[in-house]
Image: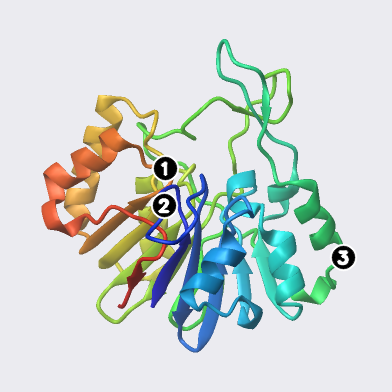
């Protein structure tokens, strides 16, 4: 079962927030995948009856503020939680859009400080694929192999825009449902198709039951969207749940191509697989 705790759009009585957090119950584990910015997570979880204090594993898809802002709260609420992320997720990050002020978009200091206080044996550094058990795993860094995908924006490692940020810490969670893979993605800065290709490779399963999360096609041009759709057609996914940073144009294109197989995401939704 997967419940959307945080998304840009919210169900009745819940708080919307530019960010993402998914609650995953599978194979006897309670997994929190990302935490949003931190302003909506705890209250939305309370409203939905999700026991954050029972979180077994906190997985961070990458080190941007809109996915890691609630880390300190989670580590406080669930003191025995295991944390799984890439070490580069804590590095400073910036977004530089032409004509706009530089924005700091990295993991907030509160999250970094909370992680620093953790016992080392509760942290798993995802520098390569990590198996959580026989039917679940995390990709670790995803190879960038397609010619048409990029990180999806003007992202940098410094405030002056000198060192581009490849966001190499970007990773996904996969679950073998028995009817194909359920893939949870944060922002797909590695590219949606790169991500799915790698998930199928590391899991040993080519069948995709569902894809949920941010596809990061907000700034994609028509060519990238069309090539993404072509690649998805060849994979025949059963269900697509675009959230967060996918973008309206891309969601519309997905619906025109896959019809009822596409469900627009809002927080509060629950999916059974």
- Dot 2, how many residues are within 10 Å of its Cα: few (below 14), some (14-19), or many (20+)? many
Marks 1 & 2, CB-CB < 8 Å contact: yes
Marks 3 & 2, CB-CB < 8 Å contact: no
- Report, in whole angstroms, how far the alpha carbon at label 1 lies from the one at label 2: 6 Å
- Residue 16 seen anywhere in this rendered image of the structure: yes
> 269 or 81: which is nearer to us?
269
According to the image, label 2 marks what residue?
195
Quarter placement of the C terminus: bottom left
- Dot 1, how many residues are within 10 Å of its Cα: few (below 14), some (14-19), or many (20+)? many
In the rendered view, does 246 fall on the left or right side of 159?
A: left
According to the image, label 3 marks what residue?
117
The disc at residue 191 is: 1
Residue pictured at 20% horizontal, 38% vertical: 253
- Report, in whole angstroms, how far the alpha carbon at label 3 lies from the one at label 1: 33 Å
Q: Quadrant of residue 46?
A: bottom right
Residue pictured at 51% horizontal, 44% vertical: 18
Q: How is the image coloured?
A: rainbow
Quarter placement of the N terminus: bottom left
Q: Residue furthest bottom?
A: 28
Q: Earlier in the sequence, mark 3 or mark 2?
A: 3
Whole-percent x, y for residue 151 in the image: 49, 35
Measured along the vertical axis of the image, is residue 50 above or below residue 145?
A: below
> 9 or 258: which is nearer to us?
9
Disc 3 versus disc 1: nearer the observer: 3
In the rendered view, does 198 fall on the left or right side of 207?
A: right
The residue tagged with tag 3: helix, strand or loop? loop
The residue tagged with tag 2: helix, strand or loop? helix
Q: Residue furthest front?
A: 13
Whole-percent x, y for residue 179 in the image: 25, 78
């Amino acid at each position: 079962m997967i419940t959307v705790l945080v998304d840009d759009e919210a169900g009745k009585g819940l708080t919307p927030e530019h960010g993402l957090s998914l609650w995953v119950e599978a194979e006897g584990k309670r997994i929190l995948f990302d935490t949003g910015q931190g302003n909506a997570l705890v209250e939305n979880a309370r409203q939905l009856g999700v026991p954050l204090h029972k979180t077994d594993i906190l997985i961070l898809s990458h080190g941007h503020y809109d996915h890691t802002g609630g880390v300190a709260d989670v580590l406080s609420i669930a003191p025995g939680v295991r944390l799984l992320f890439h070490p580069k997720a804590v590095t400073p990050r910036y977004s530089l859009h032409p004509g706009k002020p530089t924005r700091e978009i990295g993991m907030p200091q509160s999250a970094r400080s909370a992680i620093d206080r953790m016992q080392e044996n509760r942290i798993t550094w995802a520098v390569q694929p990590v198996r959580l058990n026989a039917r679940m795993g995390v990709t670790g860094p995803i190879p960038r192999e397609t010619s048409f995908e990029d990180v999806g924006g003007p992202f940098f490692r410094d405030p002056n825009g000198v060192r581009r940020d490849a966001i190499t810490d970007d990773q996904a969670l996969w679950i073998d449902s028995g009817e194909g893979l359920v893939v949870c993605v944060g922002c797909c800065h590695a590219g949606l198709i790169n991500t799915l290709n790698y998930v199928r490779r590391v899991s040993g399963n080519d069948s995709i039951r569902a894809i949920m999360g941010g596809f990061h096609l907000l700034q994609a041009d028509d060519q990238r969207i069309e090539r993404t759709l072509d690649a998805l057609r060849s994979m025949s996914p059963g269900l697509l749940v675009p959230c967060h940073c996918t973008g309206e144009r891309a969601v519309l294109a997905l619906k025109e191509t896959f019809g009822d197989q596409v469900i627009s995401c809002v927080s509060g939704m629950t999916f059974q697989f």
